Amino acid sequence: MKVFAINGSALKNGNTDILIQTVFEELHKEGIETEVIDLAGQVIEPCKACWACGGRKNCVHQKDRFREIFEKMKEADGILLGSPVYSANISANMQALLERAAVVCDMNPGLMTHKAGASVAAARRAGSMHAVDAMNHFFLNHEMFVAGSTYWNMAYGQLPGDVTKDEEGISNMRNLGQNMAFLLKHLSKENA
């Protein structure tokens, strides 16, 4: 089993990465393979609404890393999305990526069916609920199962490393990793 994570932060090794790595630690304890791609330094272009992805199972445009990322999403058993909160929402790169992925999935039904998904958000103060909700909409609209935690999948922190001071937030990430592992194992049994 493999979980593929997408870090929508403009910073590598920042708060969003810490949250993803905390979830990964729990997945590793259960023998689940992980991989993360950082969108930092990248520009993901928005969907061009050309509908050329129909029947191709991926976007036809190749000016950015979307095609590579989407292939990894299709291959994974689970997807973990992470974004910092920017203006009470997800990062622009994460938004563009999810919009394009949604169109490819809409034009090629079943690409994400029965995968596990989870989202995490790092926030300075507010907006994290909307950010997590925005990422979860992708999962829910494409027949995926969403793992949850004991509270919302968010942690507070402004500067890189600050989220480690949010004990409840880090605890929620650990619980999220445990719940995602549980879900993946049960989905694996059902598909065996």
Image (spheres, rainbow, N blue to C red):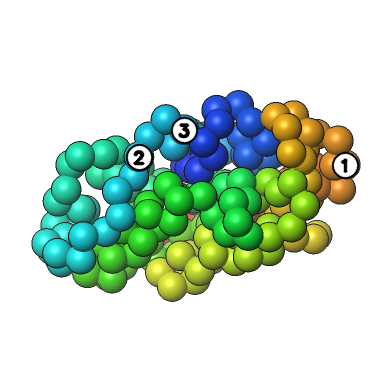
Quarter of the rendering occupied by the C terminus: bottom left
Vertical relation: 131 (above or below) 157: below
Circle 3 is placed at which residue position?
Answer: 40
Residues packed near mark 1 inside 10 Å, few (<14), some (14 to 19) or many (20 plus): few
In this view of the protein, which residue sits in the foreground, 40 or 30?
Answer: 40
In this view of the protein, which residue sits in the foreground, 188 or 119?
Answer: 119
Question: What's the residue type where badge 3 is placed?
Answer: Ala
Is any part of residue 58 visible from this angle?
Answer: yes
Vertical relation: 157 (above or below) 138: above
Mark 1 or mark 2, earlier in chain: 2
Mark 3 or mark 1, earlier in chain: 3
Label 1 SS = helix
Circle 2 is placed at which residue position?
Answer: 43
Question: What's the residue type where badge 2 is placed?
Answer: Val
Q: Position of residue 155 (x, y in %)?
A: 76, 47
**Mark 3–mark 1 distance (CA, rounded to whole Å):** 26 Å
Circle 1 is placed at which residue position?
Answer: 167
Vertical relation: 137 (above or below) 192: below
